[in-house]
Amino acid sequence: MAKASTNLGYPTYVYSRPTSPNIDLLNEFHSSGVTIFKGALDEREKLVSVLKEVDIVISALACPQVLDQLKIIEAIKVAGNIKRFLPSDFGCEEDRVTVLPSYQEFLNKKKNIRRATELAEGIPYTFVSTNCFGAYFVSYLLRPHDHEKEDITVYGSGEAKVVFIYEEDIGSYIIRVANDPSMDPRTCNSVVIFRRSTNTLFQLELIELWEEKMGRKLKKIHVSEEEIVNLSKSLPVPENIPISVLHIVCDLTKNMCICEGG
């Protein structure tokens, strides 16, 4: 998203941990014109001072830090100048799906952030549901770098509709949504869902395209819903989360499967 923001010509700021393991990425951001602020979310005065420099806040906190967004919301209240807040809400539409208990526990945390955002007075917001990241899930489902493989795993029937949205497209869409509050008020205090019909494929269709590209067929090994449910129960946290995500991605709950990629 930082790259997309600078590419679209917006002044871009990143609030990063004081000691980040992604130093090369931060250096890349800096060289592209991004202003880097370093600090912790617990440093409230510093966070508020940074927020006063911007108009729009987009949170990109990872799964373990979801509830830390409450600190961002409180800082936004104090700053008093934010025109739009987008929490780290990317993924499935948590208010509309049914998932396995191991994944529901995480989605409940995201729901808590949504409710806190809605209740915060004076903070215009947009919740963005991008669902599955395209490059990530295509790689996971196809294992394209395993050139010697003779078989491939099919989850469920393989006939669930999946919407793949390319990660770079997601970044661009999010920046456009965040920076367009006056031109399209429909995005203010609402949910925006990325669902391109041209990006929709069955898992079996995706496999067929890959087979055509390779010039050979792969043996399909089907994994049943029961096997996935049992794995979600037996695997320890957080190893049980990916398999629980697959349960919804492959439409085993009869939800429409929506994945992120272009």
Image (spheres, rainbow, N blue to C red):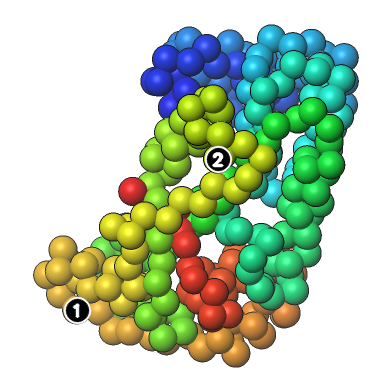
The answer to whether one can see residue 104 in this image is: yes
Indicate the amino acid at tag 1. Answer: Lys
Give x and y (percent) for residue 228. 59, 81
Horizontal relation, residue 222 to residue 75: left or right: left
- Residue located at (54% from left, 47% from top): 192
* Disc 1 to disc 2: CB gap under 8 Å: no
Residue 90: x and y in percent read: 59, 48
What residue appears at the point 86 percent right and 29 percent down from the top-left corner?
A: 74
| Disc on res. 186 | 2
Q: Amino acid at mark 2?
A: Arg
Secondary-structure class at tag 1: loop
Q: Nearer the viewer, residue 229 or 127?
A: 127
**Structural distance between the alpha carbons of marks 1 and 2:** 46 Å
Nearer the observer, 112 or 142: 112
Comparing 194 with 231, the one in front is 194
Residue 81 picture quarter? top right
The quadrant holding residue 97 is bottom right
In this rendering, is residue 136 above or below 128? below
Instruction: Name the residue: 23% across, 66% down.
Output: 210
Query: In the image, is residue 185 above or below residue 165?
Result: above
Residue that badge 1 annotates:
217
Specify whether residue 19 is in view: no
Q: Residues within 10 Å of mark 1 (few under 14, many from 20)?
A: some
